[in-house]
Image (cartoon, grey):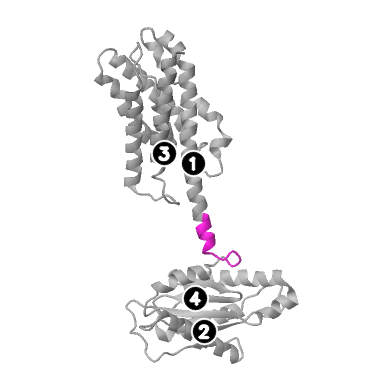
Amino acid sequence: MSLTLLQSLFVNLSVLVTLSFVMSLTYRSWPPPRHWHLKTARLTLTVLTSLALVALAPADSSGLRISLWLVPIAVMILRYGLGNGLLAGLPAALLPLLETGPGTAAVTVSLINLLLVGGLSHLFRWTLDMNDPHGSLHRHAWIAALLFLPVNLGLVLLPGGPDALERTYVSGWVFNMVGFWAVASMITGRVALLQSTDTYREQAHQDALSGLPNRRQFELDLPFTVPGDALLLIDVDHFKRVNDLYGHPVGDEVLKRMGTLLSDALRGRDRAYRYGGEEFAVILRRVQPGRIEEVAHRLRELIASTDFGELPGQVTVSIGGSPFGLWSRTRTLWDADEALYRAKQGGRNAVTISAPDLFPHEPEGTDAPALNPTLS
């Protein structure tokens, strides 16, 4: 093992890590978008990286360049499959043809290396999951050692190859393992960060108890309402009494069940929210003004007829609603809140819909039921 070889492999490792960091920056969101141009960009970067690693490695007496060019290829095979990986590795494997001397023999060795390492990478593709944030790479680190066992074994086909293999095999194998570990850790770490960010973002906009979007998400969605949409505010009647008589765990179950009922009852384009405490909000999309009260009564009747388990009596709700119009959304929110107050003051288990002075024209494409068809 010569000092020149170690220096060459160290330079290769440095270049590999640098270019792989650039590759990791293409992982920008989770879940990963299925855009063909993103896959093409990564495969192109892989081709350029492998070519650069081969070009930077000095050729030995056998004409073979000892480099880490197979590392990015193995990573791409784990990510996109054997065919894409072999295609990305072909330019680097054929690069020795541009040189004088034993170019054909060096190409033969490179192709053998590509097929052997590629085959092993494909074999372990389902064990080493590059999208696994929980550490399949760490649990199966020994696989990295197996992937690069065949590296440069094809040297035995060249004149003086066995001696060259003896000088370079161990160092080449070790540096390939280290390089693969560094690159794979970089990418899986990036994926784990994106997945955690996505989870935290979802948790920040979702109520953990009911499973519905929370008030923060409601306030984000409110500006995107248009005339022809409507708002319902739903308050569980005498909820404090439920907590006092049966305990907070029973009260929590009521809120969970409310979240399920509202999610299942609404159309896909409508959305329910836990507005706060025992109060829920529903944004109805493209609903005729004359149907708002009908929808609210169906929700009220659905909840009143539902068995809430440990509660001996029925759970009822009061609902206040208002359409969105050409006026401000804040006014709609106030109108719905005032309507809810009147429904509660009128004895609860009731529906009150605010009637603004001016209704918007019925939007095109409105349909009568604003609930899941199974509840119509």
Q: Secondary structure at mark 4?
A: strand
What residue would you read off at disc 1?
188
Q: Secondary structure at mark 3?
A: helix
The CA span between labels 4 and 1 is 39 Å
* Residue denoted by label 4: 282
Amino acid on which disc 4 is placed: Val
- First in sequence: mark 1 vs mark 3: 3
SS class of the residue under badge 1?
Answer: helix
Q: Are marks 1 and 3 in contact (CB under 8 Å)?
A: no
Look at mark 2 in the image and give the residue it sits on. 337
Which mark, residue 21?
3
Q: Residue at x 33, y 79 (%)?
A: 363
Amino acid residing under circle 2: Asp
Number of other residues with Cα within 10 Å of mark 2, as a class: few under 14, some 14 to 19, many 20 or more: many
Q: Nearer the viewer, residue 246 or 176?
A: 176
Numbered badge on residue 163: none
Q: In the picture, residue 312 is in which quadrant?
A: bottom right
Tell whether label 1 touches label 4 (CB within 8 Å). Answer: no
Other residues around mark 4 within 10 Å, as few (<14) / some (14–19) / many (≥20): many
Q: Which residues are magenta?
A: 199-210
Under mark 3, the amino acid is Phe
- Crowd rating for badge 3 (residues with CA inside 10 Å; few <14, some 14–19, many 20+): some
Residue drawn at 25 percent across, 15 percent down: 100
- In the rendered image, residue 105, in percent from the top left (x then y), is placed at 32, 14
Which is more N-terminal, label 1 or label 4?
1
In 3D space, how far apart are the residues under numbered discs 2 and 1 (Cα atoms)? Answer: 48 Å
Q: Identify the image quadrant of residue 21.
A: top left
The crowding category of the residue bearing disc 1, from other C-alpha atoms within 10 Å (few below 14, some 14 to 19, many at least 20), is many
